[in-house]
Amino acid sequence: MEKAIEDNIKLKIAISLKILLEKRKNNSINIIKEDSLGVSYNTIALNADIRKATVSNIFNANTSPNSITLVLIIEAMGYNLIDFSKIYDSIKEKDIQNFIKNKL
């Protein structure tokens, strides 16, 4: 796969996951459930039974997750693939550029 395409996918995954995480944090209904739902890299890692560093690397677009890891992370936050895919499909080039700019 061409590196530019792979990087673009990696960035869109990271942006989508960050949006889902922010939605989870802002959802006042789930404040009581905060310990059981992924509202931080640590709780996501614990819920998904993966390393916190792996979660961090994926959220920061440093690595591409395999499909199993991606599903584990999404579900650890209390979402499903449909929730993720709607956001992923809505990501525009300007969103990617803003993410890159803010990452630097």
Image (tube, rainbow, N blue to C red):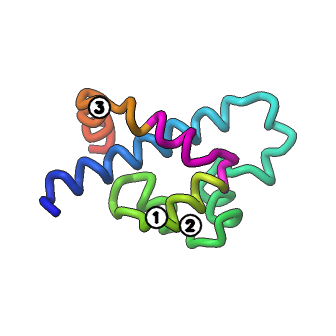
Residue that carries the numbered disc 1 in the rendered image: 67
Question: Total of numbered circles in the picture?
Answer: 3
- Please tell me whether residue 56 is drawn above or below residue 51 in the rendered image: above
- Contact? badges 1 and 2 (CB < 8 Å): no
Viewer-nearest of labels 1 and 2? 1
Which disc, if any, is residue 52? 2
Residue receiving disc 3: 98
Graded by Cα atoms within 10 Å as few (under 14), some (14 to 19) or many (20 or more), the crowding at tag 1 reads: few
- Crowding at dot 3, Cα within 10 Å, few <14 / some 14-19 / many 20+, comes out as few
Q: Is residue 95 left or right of residue 17?
A: left
Query: Residue at the spot x=66%, y=56% of the render?
Result: 76
Q: Amino acid at mark 2?
A: Lys
Placement of 99 over or under 73, stated as above or below: above
Query: Quick check: marks 1 and 3 in contact, CB under 8 Å?
Result: no
Q: Magenta residues?
A: 76-87
- Say if 103 sits above or below 7 in the image: above
At numbered mark 1, what does the secondary structure look like: helix, strand or loop? Answer: helix
Name the residue at 35% across, 32% down.
91
